[in-house]
């Protein structure tokens, strides 16, 4: 890895592997199923239009389950890195981008997280285009607190929809000295293309994962192991502990 004195701005991308050790299932199995549902049925606008009750019940269960989980050492280590890096490298930044829709990074101490695929604990009103925190069910079609229209849907980016805050992510990648991918499969775009963009722009690239991802060849270095073990170790090394 590049010497620490050459690293100023860090961009970290996290995927399902970071939250798996907290008991949150990875997105889908090898058979294309997500908790025994076809992805096309529960994670596309077409599926929602076809059977909204199925989709709302599915996300109600996910929203309830996530609130029973706790952050693991990987989440806590990344929160510590975000807080301590600017003190150690004046003017340095840590940008945390996650594909995960849980709130474990925030509960682990991260202060500013870009949820590019949305969040389970927020809802989107398709009538007035507002978003707000939401912890209860949606199956009974509660009215929007803002416009009183029963038009709330999960604030999750489905297949075929544009990920959130892409402009911010691209700017961060352009300014990055180090790009780190943690717990991602390298299969879902546009996130899977971040490593190539960062590397072509001159950043060092590091993969921390349970196994090699589909994009492993783009990384300068890969470290394999459970996120709860290798992420705290990497953060300690980066902070000189």
Image (cartoon, rainbow, N blue to C red):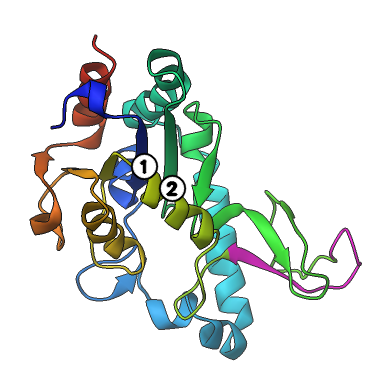
Q: Is residue 135 above or below residue 95?
A: below
What number of labels is visible? 2
The residue carrying mark 2 is 172
SS state under label 2: helix
Pick the front one: 117 or 151? 117
Which residues are drawn in magenta?
144-155
Residue in front for this viewpoint, 238 or 229: 238
Q: Residue 26 placed where, x, y %?
A: 31, 56
Quarter assignment of residue 226: top left
The vertical placement of 11 against 241, above or below, is: below
Q: Which mark is residue 188?
A: none
Residue 87 drawn at (x, y percent): 45, 14
- Left or right of residue 4, residue 188 in this image: right
Q: CA distance from mark 1 to mark 2?
A: 7 Å
**Left or right side of 18 for 2:** left
Residue 146 lies within the magenta run: yes
At x 38%, y 51%, the residue is 174
Q: Are marks 1 and 2 in contact (CB under 8 Å)?
A: yes
Q: Residue furthest top?
A: 241
Q: Which quadrant holds residue 232? A: top left
Q: Main secondary structure of the magenta part?
A: loop
Q: Can you say whether 229 is above or below 19 in the image?
A: above
Q: Earlier in the sequence, mark 1 or mark 2?
A: 1
The residue where tag 1 is placed is: 11
């Amino acid at each position: 890895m590049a010497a620490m004195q050459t690293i100023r701005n860090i961009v970290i991308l996290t995927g399902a592997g970071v939250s798996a050790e907290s008991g949150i299932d990875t997105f889908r199995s090898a058979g294309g199923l997500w908790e025994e549902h076809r992805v096309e049925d529960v994670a596309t606008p077409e599926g929602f239009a076809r059977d909204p009750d199925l989709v709302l019940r599915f996300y109600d269960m996910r929203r309830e389950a996530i609130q029973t989980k706790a952050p693991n050492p990987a989440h806590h280590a990344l929160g510590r890195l975000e807080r301590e890096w600017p003190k150690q490298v004046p003017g340095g930044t840590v940008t945390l981008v996650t594909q995960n829709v849980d709130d474990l990074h925030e509960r682990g101490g991260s202060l500013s997280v870009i949820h590019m695929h949305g969040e389970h604990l927020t809802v989107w009103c398709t009538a007035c285009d507002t978003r707000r925190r939401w912890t209860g069910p949606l199956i009974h079609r509660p009215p929007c607190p803002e416009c009183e229209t029963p038009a709330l849907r999960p604030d999750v980016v489905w297949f075929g929809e544009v990920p959130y805050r892409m402009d911010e992510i691209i700017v961060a990648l352009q300014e990055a000295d180090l790009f780190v991918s943690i717990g991602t499969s390298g299969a879902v775009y546009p996130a899977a293309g971040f490593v190539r963009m960062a590397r072509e722009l001159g950043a060092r690239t590091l993969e921390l994962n349970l196994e090699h991802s589909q994009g492993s060849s783009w990384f300068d270095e890969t470290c394999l192991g459970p996120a709860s073990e290798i992420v705290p170790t990497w953060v300690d090394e980066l902070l000189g502990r």
